[in-house]
Image (cartoon, rainbow, N blue to C red):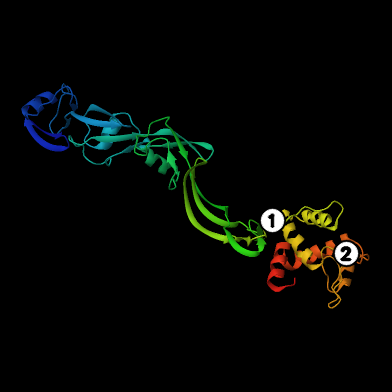
Amino acid sequence: MHKTVTVEVDGSPVEVTAFGRTVGQVLAAGDITVTADDLVAPGLDERVADGAQIVVRHGREMTVEVDGEERTVWTTALTVGEAVEGMGLRDDQTLLSASRSSSLSREDVLRVSTQKTVHLAVDGQVIDGVTSAATVRDALREIGLVLNEGDRVSVPLDATATDGLVVMVTRAASAGETVEEAVPFEEQEVEDPTLAKGTRVVSTPGRAGVRTTTYSTATVGGAVVDRQVVATAVTVAPVTQVVKVGTMEVAAGVDITVSPGSAQELGKQLAAERGWGDDQFACLLQLWNKESGWRVNAENKSSGAYGIPQSLPGSKMASVGADWRTNPATQITWGLNYIGGRYTTPCGAWSHSQARGWY
């Protein structure tokens, strides 16, 4: 019996007029070729009536990449959504590289990312994130993990995200650090003609300064990876140490041998207790030889100066002891105090005496 049938071939309707009884006969009459890989509904052996509709979907080979693994499948689907459904993948658990409603392309690779669990070790805890993202970068973003500048990730961000993947994130940190360092002081030598040659006396003690440096320190996982100087300045200036260097030539050949129990021996002993050595005693010996000959009762009738150091007036020595008229220890102690306070050293006093005639 003659009949007219509408055949939908891969989504396009074709009207076929034929005398065939079955679907297969009608398709053959319309020169529509099918194989075992194609979808035909109703089946080829089903009887067909006038005005019936037949659906033909030719099978095609397509390339699909599922979670980074590429494979080839056969499908009769017309759209991306139908193809994914045909592979048994749920729409709500997959992420596709093309819209589900778009037509299948023979040339393009369909990339499918399935739902997976990714374990993130970060900030001292482990986060189990469920995601359909294709890459580690997108998975972190979908889970809500924000990477800061300098943070390190154990897996390349462009790597494929797979089920069970463990990603370790090491946080970077930056902090300021202030360090104080000592600035050495300099030493300045000043010649002093009142000091015996070879004598060195610190007149102004040196003091180290302070340099304050601020660093910006970057760490990753607690380890320092970078350290930059932000600012540096001398916050406490060093104090230069001033040393007086004696230049006075002490008369050569001065005999500093003293008689045991004499005033000179006592003078040498008391001078040594002040840190004055033989060079200074040589100056003291000459100075008081000139002034009094080291006599306790030496008296200058015209000026009133008295005693070994020729104190003017002699009563000044009472500040050391009431026996200032007769005790050499009292007189020498006062005299050494006077010399130390006014001339620093015996050689300083002797130099002044030589230049001025008095001290």
Q: From the viewer's perspective, is residue 342 above or below residue 110?
A: below
Residue highlighted by disc 2: 296
Place of residue 287 in the rendered image (x, y in percent of width and height, measured from the top left): 75, 64
Q: Is disc 1 surrounded by few (<14), some (14 to 19) or many (20+) residues within 10 Å?
A: few
Place of residue 209 in the rendered image (x, y in percent of width and height, measured from the top left): 59, 58
Disc 2 or disc 1, which is closer to the eye?
1
**Quarter occupied by the N terminus:** top left
* Depth order, front residue of 229/18: 229
Q: Say left or right for 159 vs 26.
A: right
Q: From the viewer's perspective, is residue 281 above or below residue 13?
A: below
Q: Are marks 2 and 1 in contact (CB under 8 Å)?
A: no
Kind of residue indicated by mark 1? Gly
Q: Earlier in the sequence, mark 2 or mark 1?
A: 1
User: In the displayed image of the protein, which residue is found farthest to the right?
Assistant: 322
User: In the displayed image of the protein, which residue is found farthest to the bottom?
Assistant: 302
Residue 339 visible within the image: yes
Identify the residue shown where x is 50% and y is 58%.
Answer: 231
Which SS class for mark 1?
Answer: loop
Place of residue 159 in the rendered image (x, y in percent of width and height, measured from the top left): 35, 35
